[in-house]
Amino acid sequence: MNHSDKQKVWVVSVDMGYGHQRTAYPLKHLAFENEIINANNYQGIPKKDRNIWQSTRKLYETISRFKRVPLIGEFSFSVFDRFQRILTFYPKRDLSKPNFSLKKIYSLFKGGWGKHLIEKLKEKPRPIISTFFTPTFMAEFFNYPSDIYCVVCDADIARPWAALKPKSSRIKYFAPTKRVVERLKLYGAKPENIFFTGYPLPLENIGTKDLEILKHDLACRLLNLDPKKRYFHQYQILIDKYVGDLPEKSDHIFTVMFAVGGAGAQREVGYKILKSLKNEIQNEQLKLILVAGTRERVKNYFLNCIENLGLKTGVEIIFNNSIQGYFNDFNSALRKSDILWTKPSELSFYTGLGLPIIIAPSIGSQEHYNREWLLKLGSGIVQQDPDYTNEWLFDLLESGWFAEAAMEGFIEAEKRGVFNIEEIASQPPGFPL
């Protein structure tokens, strides 16, 4: 669907880590003037508003990095994480009562936090699609005149994702999993305002609704992930049904991508992987991609690791000063990657691209639930000792497990989230959905 400027929406995010911006990136083509607005860092933002946003961001990033400090780091993070923890789903019960964090957010609105942003958007009222809950609350609080949508970017969510008074709220939700749909109902959101769309995966990795790019990449990936043809021998019919004919040869060498989080946490794991796989890299048995994102200090850390190990080729670093440039480079490299190794952030949903996920340790309550979602799907495996990656990685590869995980992710995870979101958001106000 080609959107004219009249049909386009405001796509809103926040630059706090990568998660919310990565979720917004595939929706850029829906955005007015193809611009994604960062609610905490837009042109003309009042200093008072910026300071409130910055204090939250700095606290999270500091504690995420501090978590690596033995004993005291874990304790400090656990105290912080209690404010964003996700309560048990069972027994099913009314969880609509707002918690302390949510009440604090709304108290700041009374002081004017967010009013400037919403007044600017009111100048050209059009639907808002936000990948973070706070801007949607701001829009409703300050009486925004058009539709308000919130894209959820985790497999399960804490109470602050739903409005202070959810039963009367008009905020609509795009849910990536069925669990999020049911969780929002427990939080009091109206069922008619909740849409199971799946997570918005990047169009450059999908193609059209027919998934032609995704299927091409998965076909090449399967050849690398099942060198002994053990999965093929058992499930050839499944491959034929969902992927189609495979080429005679993959278009790339067996490739593992390791991605650190937005706060730069877990970069030391990257060094351990690199060190363990040194011989295999030198012997051209695989390629390793290390994702530094927009963090120059992480890039420099990886460069030093590569130099110290004396590696000349076989290792690539993904780094870009621009967040949009980083996402573009990342998505491009992902097309010729066979395994994604990452903490269970929003990248968990990229298993829908037919990617097996090696799950690094979780950071935060929501990542724990993303981890559980991957394990239930059968497309993720908890990382084993990174110091011995060269042993367990190839054992799993030769068993055909990674090929099976790639197919599980592709079949079980919803892949057309961006198209589903576009279809719903493009309907005129009052249109029955």
Image (tube, grey):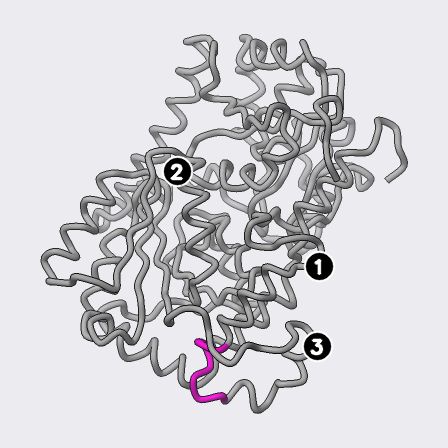
In the rendered structure, are the residues bearing label 2 and label 1 in contact, judged by CB atoms less than 8 Å apart? no
Q: Residue at x 50, y 41 (%)?
A: 22
Residue at image point 40% right, 41% down:
326
Horizontally, residue 225 falls left or right of residue 103, namely left
Does residue 261 lie above or below 21 as drawn? below
Q: Quick one: 83 or 414, which is closer to the camera? A: 414
| Mark 2 vs mark 1: in front | 1
Q: Secondary structure at mark 1?
A: loop
- How far apart marks 3 and 1 lie (CA) works out to 14 Å
Mark 2 or mark 1, earlier in chain: 2
Provide residue 356's location: percent of width, then percent of height: 48, 67
Looking at the image, residue 212 lies above or below residue 72:
below
Q: Is residue 127 left or right of residue 333?
A: right
Q: Earlier in the sequence, mark 3 or mark 1?
A: 1
- Whether residues under marks 3 and 1 lie with C-beta atoms below 8 angstroms apart, the answer is no
Which quadrant is home to the N terminus? top right
Query: Counting other residues with Cα less than 10 Å from the Cα at mark 2, is it few (<14), some (14-19), or many (20 or more)?
Result: some
In the picture of the structure, the residue carrying the numbered disc 1 is 210
Task: Count neighbours of disc 3 (C-alpha within 10 A) and say few if under 14, some if 14 to 19, many if 20 or more.
Answer: few
Q: Is residue 12 above or below residue 411?
A: above
Q: Secondary structure at mark 3?
A: helix
Dot 1: few (<14), some (14–19), or many (≥20) neighbours within 10 Å? few
Q: Amino acid at mark 2?
A: Phe
Q: Nearer the viewer, mark 3 or mark 2?
A: 3
In magenta, the rendered stretch is 223-229
The spot of residue 297 in percent (x, y) is 22, 40
- Residue position for label 3: 241
Residue 161 lies in the magenta stretch: no
- Residue linked to disc 2: 80
**Secondary element at tag 2:** helix
Measuring 30% from the left and 63% from the top, which residue is drawn there? 288
